[in-house]
């Protein structure tokens, strides 16, 4: 009986021994393991390694991880507030808990969209957790839509989501009411999809599509704005961040957006985005930003190009 | 004396709409999860992204958290799936040795530091699928039965995997020990120069 065979045979007992559960069980097992450890160098070393693993230091995540989480939570709560404002039944939150993302009545022109969504939604949320798969990864359905169909959807949604002055709002019969209700429903669903796409870290091109869609909206939606702010600060792709900045800049007349833009000027930010932020502050003649710029200037590790831009920005705004 | 809510209590509240309760769960689990990913991948940025992804998924799938579900195995199920999806989504597979600096160990125990650095490097050299079970049982506080349910295999399989992972770890440590210059020699050569 070679030592190797012995090791294999008591592998399971060893695992229990290491976990400390062997003491509770049969004392015979404990003796078997201890006897083996007396004669087997390899297993002794492995038991030693197990103990030494406890020496491995515990790394700390960057504090910005918490801010990033908070920003995501903010998007979620913005969606909840919206749901409460609309006073609807159930929760129309920014992150919909596994419910159908498509409006109740299906427009024929959106059939392609709906069918693919139904396929993806075929797995319940629970199964999606048990099995990793495309439905968990986010927008699996629109990977299956050809590029042309996606463009058509955008066109259509743009049509739906255009300014409400397009439509005569008023009691022009039940058909018109129905139409409006469906439009609102589709728009709301679209916003949810877009918000979700920005928060999920699957594909940069998908997040970019979401950001670009948001940029085309006339009426800024609070949770979409929150998602754009999140994207500006935390997206893993610089291109997507710049696109988010572009989208947000359209709403710079709103004080809360200006405040979020100022807050985004942080040391831990891509230099390209830092420069774009400074340029925007100067372009919009945002004097409130002067203080933030001065504070930002204090950072010792600024990229030289960024530093020049900051100094220029301060001069322009003073 | 205030009652400290359990993970499960908090998750019930999240499920019922109290998103801010997730913040407490975040405080409890961000570091263990981060370290779980770090030990698997060796990459800080990827690990941070994945932690964020896990909490996003918790929010998104909160309705599916059922009564009687222990929270810890549930969150690690989500964590594993997030990693699997992320690996699938990666277009360019860049395979490189993670140039990783483990967190600072106390300067006093120099010998201990060298040893734990060696151990860390050996762990980083192991493929993810081989060391995952070891990490889950040794660091993440999961019992073998829980890991078995997580992985969808028998408990005995989990125990065997732990044993094999330790064996491979030991062999890797030996390999690294043979390769590295002995501290005495390095010191000597400095003196001569």
Image: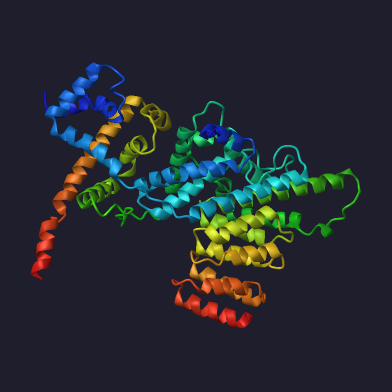
The residue under the point 68% across, 67% down is A250
Across and down, in percent, residue A186 comes to 72, 48
Q: Quadrant of the N terminus of chain B?
A: top right
Q: Is residue B111 above or below residue A51?
A: below
Q: Residue furthest front?
A: B1
- Depth order, front residue of A210/B36: B36
Up-down relation of residue B69 to residue B41 (above or below):
above
User: How many numbered badges does the structure rendering display?
Assistant: 0
- Looking at the image, which residue is at 62% across and 61% down? A212
In which quadrant of the rendered view does residue B32 lie?
Answer: top left
Residue B131 image offset from top left, x and y in percent: 31, 40
Relative to B9, does residue A318 appear above or below in the rendering?
below
Q: Nearer the viewer, residue A65 or A270?
A: A65
Q: Is residue A109 visible?
A: no
Residue A107 is situated, as x and y percent measured from the top left of the image, at 74, 45
Quick one: quadrant of the C terminus of chain B? bottom left
- Nearest the eye: A211 or A34: A34
């Amino acid at each position: 009986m070679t030592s190797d065979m012995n090791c294999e045979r008591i592998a399971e007992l060893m695992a229990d021994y290491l976990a400390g559960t062997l003491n509770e069980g049969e004392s015979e097992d404990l003796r078997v393991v201890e006897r083996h450890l007396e004669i087997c160098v390899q297993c002794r070393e492995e038991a030693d390694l197990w103990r030494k693993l406890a020496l491995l230091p515990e790394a700390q995540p960057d504090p910005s991880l918490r801010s990033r989480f908070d920003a995501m939570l903010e998007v979620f709560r913005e969606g909840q507030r919206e749901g409460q404002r609309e006073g609807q039944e159930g929760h129309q939150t920014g992150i919909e808990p596994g419910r159908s993302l498509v409006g109740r009545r299906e427009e024929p022109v959106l059939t392609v969209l709906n069918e693919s969504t139904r396929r993806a939604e075929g797995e319940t949320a629970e199964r999606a957790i048990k099995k990793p798969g495309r439905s968990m990864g986010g927008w699996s359905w629109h990977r299956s839509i050809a590029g042309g169909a996606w463009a058509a959807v955008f066109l259509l949604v743009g049509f739906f989501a255009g300014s409400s002055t397009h439509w005569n709002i008023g009691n022009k019969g039940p058909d018109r009411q129905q139409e409006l209700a469906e439009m609102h429903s589709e728009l709301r669903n679209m916003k949810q999809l877009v918000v979700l796409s920005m928060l999920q870290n699957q594909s940069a091109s998908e997040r970019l599509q979401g950001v670009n869609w948001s940029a085309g909206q006339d009426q800024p939606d609070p949770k979409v704005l929150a998602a754009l702010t999140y994207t500006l600060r935390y997206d893993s792709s610089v291109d997507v961040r710049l696109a988010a900045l572009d989208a947000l800049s359209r709403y710079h007349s709103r004080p809360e957006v200006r405040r979020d833009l100022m807050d985004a000027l942080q040391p831990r930010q891509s230099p390209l985005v830092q420069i774009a932020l400074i340029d925007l502050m100067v372009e919009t003649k945002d004097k409130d930003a002067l203080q933030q710029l001065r504070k930002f200037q204090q950072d010792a590790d600024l990229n030289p190009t960024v530093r020049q831009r900051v100094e220029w920005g301060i001069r322009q705004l003073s | 004396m205030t009652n400290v809510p359990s993970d499960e209590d908090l998750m019930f509240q999240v499920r019922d709409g109290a998103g801010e309760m997730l913040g407490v769960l975040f405080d409890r689990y961000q570091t263990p999860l981060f370290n779980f990913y770090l030990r698997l991948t060796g990459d800080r940025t990827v690990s941070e992204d994945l932690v964020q992804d896990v909490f996003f998924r918790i929010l998104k799938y909160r309705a599916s958290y059922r009564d009687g579900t222990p929270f810890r195995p549930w969150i690690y199920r989500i964590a594993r799936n997030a990693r699997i999806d992320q690996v699938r989504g990666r277009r360019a597979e860049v395979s490189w040795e993670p140039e990783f600096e483990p967190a600072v160990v106390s300067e006093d125990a120099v010998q201990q530091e060298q040893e734990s650095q060696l151990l860390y490097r050996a762990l980083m050299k192991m493929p993810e699928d081989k060391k995952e079970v070891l990490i889950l049982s040794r660091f993440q506080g999961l019992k073998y039965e829980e890991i078995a349910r997580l992985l969808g295999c028998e408990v005995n399989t989990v125990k065997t995997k732990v044993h094999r992972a330790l064996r491979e770890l030991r062999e890797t440590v030996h390999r690294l020990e043979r390769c590295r210059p002995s501290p005495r020699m390095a010191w000597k050569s400095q003196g001569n120069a």
